[in-house]
Amino acid sequence: MKLRTTFYYLLILIISTSCSDAQEYLEDSHEVVVKESKDFGILKGIPSPFKLEKYTILDPNPTGKYLGGSAFASICKKNDNDYLVVAMGYGKYDDFAFSELLNFDLNIQTKQFTGTSLFQENLSKIQTGGNSLVKLNDKVILSLFYGKESANSINIYMKSSGDNGVTWSGPKMINTLKDVYQHAANNRAILLSSGRILLPMAIGGAGSKNYIFCYYSDDNGDTWQNTKLLYTKGNSLYEPCVEELSDGRLIMTLRNSSGKIIFAFSNDDGLTWTDFVKSDITSPDAPSTIAKIPGKNLLVLSWNNTDRIFDYHNRSPLSLAISKDEGKTWKYLFDIENTLNVGAYYPTINFSKDKMLITYTKKNAGDSRSVVVFSEVSISSLEDLLNKAN
């Protein structure tokens, strides 16, 4: 009886300490003020009828293990023609259903997808997903993903390849924050020009607040630290996306509940964030993706351009805009997907030599399965559309 009593005491102590640690993270946070902006994030123009050729690429095992389909891809360049694609494979399409990570090889010349395999089995009680791929050099690629343990706990893991994605290490946990519902959207990690690896994060399920922060590593992923948690009153900041500007600053886009995209900026490689501004760009409670075209002073933005209330099936159209003044103004170029009762969301943007590669998750109203769609457009076509818009 004494042994049993001691066991229960230790169990209660562990649980209490865990909850206390989680609460301490949230209390050591900083409130930010989001300002209305009349001169930043202004969307101009009307969309061109430009049409993309699209390929449904990830529809794994429709009658077997992954009945919920595939979703939330990340993509990484292996060489000029070959790309590594990692996406979630769902047993059922649900935030709290079984999922694991699947690997696909993409050749952008042939539009062929080969080598489908299990990239990471589910290592948590609920699901594994939210993958980002970061290429450090010609040989080293990092994969960062989450393991969902409960409605109150998600851990972040990393695995690495030293041979350009041929073989991979086992996963190791990297999160410094414990026992919180922390999450990064797919394809969010970024390698900065300073060599820092930045993983923009959010914490949800913490009372009435959502928090944003970043994990970062300055030693190629060997060790990780977290920035201070940020929140704002009366709004939910979630699923940030970061890109580096030409002057070295970082720009962040934020999913939120205001009906407009919120931007923020950092002057210290993501350690602190300032100048939170509510833009003119209409968006529901859904994530956006921002990316810089290599070698050009042009930013591209993909987002759901609608004021409909939150609903997976109302996440359409999925649109594309371009900015040549580092986000101050945006030219509305075209809609990537614009079909009634079709959800098109969580886009990724990557670049080959002369093309922009886009993936997104697509789910038709009433369907129980999602798929990942791939499309591409030449950078010269984007520049032509920008010039016509002017």
Image (cartoon, helix red, strand yellow):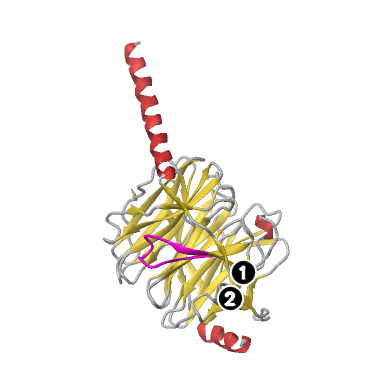
For label 1, the crowd category at 10 Å Cα-Cα, with few meaning under 14, some 14 to 19 and many 20 or more, is: many
Give, as a three-letter code, the residue at label 1.
Answer: Ile
The residue depicted at 58 percent of the width and 57 percent of the height is 256
Q: Is residue 104 above or below residue 351?
A: above
Give the residue at the far top of this rendering. Answer: 1
Quarter of the image for the C terminus: give it: bottom right
Q: Which residues are magenta?
A: 263-276
Say whether residue 112 is visible.
yes
Residue 173: give x, y in percent of width and height.
Answer: 34, 48
Q: Can you tell which quarter of the image residue 54 is in?
A: bottom right
Say whether residue 101 is visible.
no
Q: Is residue 375 above or below residue 102?
A: below
Give, as a three-letter code, the residue at label 2.
Answer: Ala
Residue of label 2: 321
Residue of label 1: 281
Residue 243: give x, y in percent of width and height.
Answer: 44, 69
Residue 275: give x, y in percent of width and height.
Answer: 48, 65
The residue depicted at 54 percent of the width and 48 percent of the height is 65
Residue 307: give x, y in percent of width and height.
Answer: 69, 63
Q: Say whether residue 305 is left or right of residue 185.
A: right
